[in-house]
Every structure is written in C-alpha cells, then in structure tokens.
Image: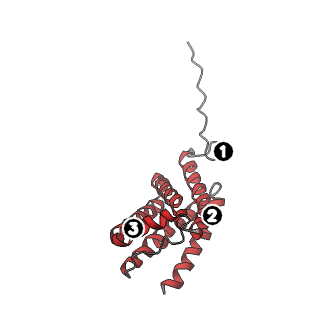
Amino acid sequence: MFSVVGPIVWTACFLAAVVAAVLAGRSRRAMAVGRIAVGLLMLVGGAAFNLVQLLLGNDYSGFADPAPFGWVTDAWEAVVPGNHVVLIGLLVLFEATVGALILSGGRRTQLGYAGAIAFHCALWLFGWFEAVYVVLMLPVLVLLLRAERRATVSPSGPSGTAPGRRAPPAPRSPVRG
C-alpha cells in the first residue's frame, strides 16, 4: 500500500506547493494551499515515511551511496546504521516539528519554512535525485516564506499601499497657538 500511496501523495503535495508558491504573493488562498502542501510533505512524506521505515527495521544502510562525495557516504555508513533508531528518530521528530510549525500559521509558519529551507540545503548531498528535488523545492520554499513574511508585515485594513509595504503615517494636524 505505502509504495503506491506515498508517491501519489508526495507528487500531489509537491505540485500543489509549486503552483501555490507562484501565486502566494498575490493570493492568501494560494499561500494557505502552499502551507498545507509543504506541511503535509514534511509530515507525511518525511516524518511518517521515515517512522514507517524505522518500524519495518530499515537501518538506512546504503542511503548515502549515491552521494557525489565519498566522505558523505563514508560518514553516513560509519555513524547512521549503528545508531539509526536514535538518529532517524531525531529526523522524524525534526520533520514532524517543521511540518506542524508550517501548518500552525503566523510567525510559527515562517520558522517552519526556515527549518525546511535549512533541511533542503543539506539534502542535496545525498545524490542526484535529492539534488534535483532541492533545486526545484528551494525556490518554492523561499517564495512561500516571502509571502508569509509580507502577509505579516502588511497593514490591516485598506490603506492603498502595495502588498507587503507599510502604510505611511497619518498626516498630523497643524498645531494652533
């Protein structure tokens, strides 16, 4: 079951995140769709997938074999398989926390996106597939973070200012003596 459902959910979330990122600067609905898509990617495609792998007894030996640098593969094989329950458990905790932060809204969403960006900045080290995914996903994450930051800065109520810009101060009344 997981072999069919996982890639379908991952692809749907990825594509929704890409489209939402392009539109998020102009649409709060697109920003919310992006938040849901990336949050689910981190929770389901990341944390849940790795948790299932742990429960099935996968020790993650060989995961770093496609890495472009030998030191990545050597370090991975020297450290992770022998400590996979703790290390992959921490990865599951991190991915679940990032996913929950992204879904929670407000400044927590921005923190979650920052965590997802940091995670993806390291992910490319593990092979060509991961590198291609990172090249596609980093701009999506940055655009969604940018939209969230601008939404936080924008003033409430109509002001005639461009989205993401602060409204100018109200004119002062002249002082009469």
How far apart in space, not on screen, are marks 1 and 2 (Cα)?
A: 28 Å
Vertical relation: 111 (above or below) 170: below
Q: Is residue 142 above or below residue 176?
A: below
Earlier residue among tags 3 and 1: 3
Question: What kind of residue is marked 1?
Answer: Ala
State if disc 2 and disc 1 touch (CB < 8 Å): no
* Amino acid at dot 3: Ala
Left or right relative to 83: residue 34? right
Q: Residue at x 48, y 83 (%)?
A: 2
Tell me the mark number nearer the camera, choosing from 3 and 1.
Answer: 3
Q: Which residue in the rendered view is the most extreme toward the top?
A: 177
> From the viewer's perspective, is the residue at label 3 or at label 2 nearer?
3
**Which structural element holds mark 2?**
helix
Q: In the rendered view of the protein, which quadrant contains the C terminus?
A: top right
Q: Position of residue 142 (x, y in %)?
A: 58, 55
| Residue placed most toward the observer, 3 or 38 | 3
Classify residue 155 as left or right of residue 56: right
Residue flagged by tag 2: what amino acid is it? Leu
Label 3, on which residue? 78
Residue 47 at x, y percent in the picture: 43, 70
Q: Which residue is mark 1?
A: 162
On the rendered structure, is 78 left or right of 130?
A: left
Q: Which residue is mark 2?
A: 136
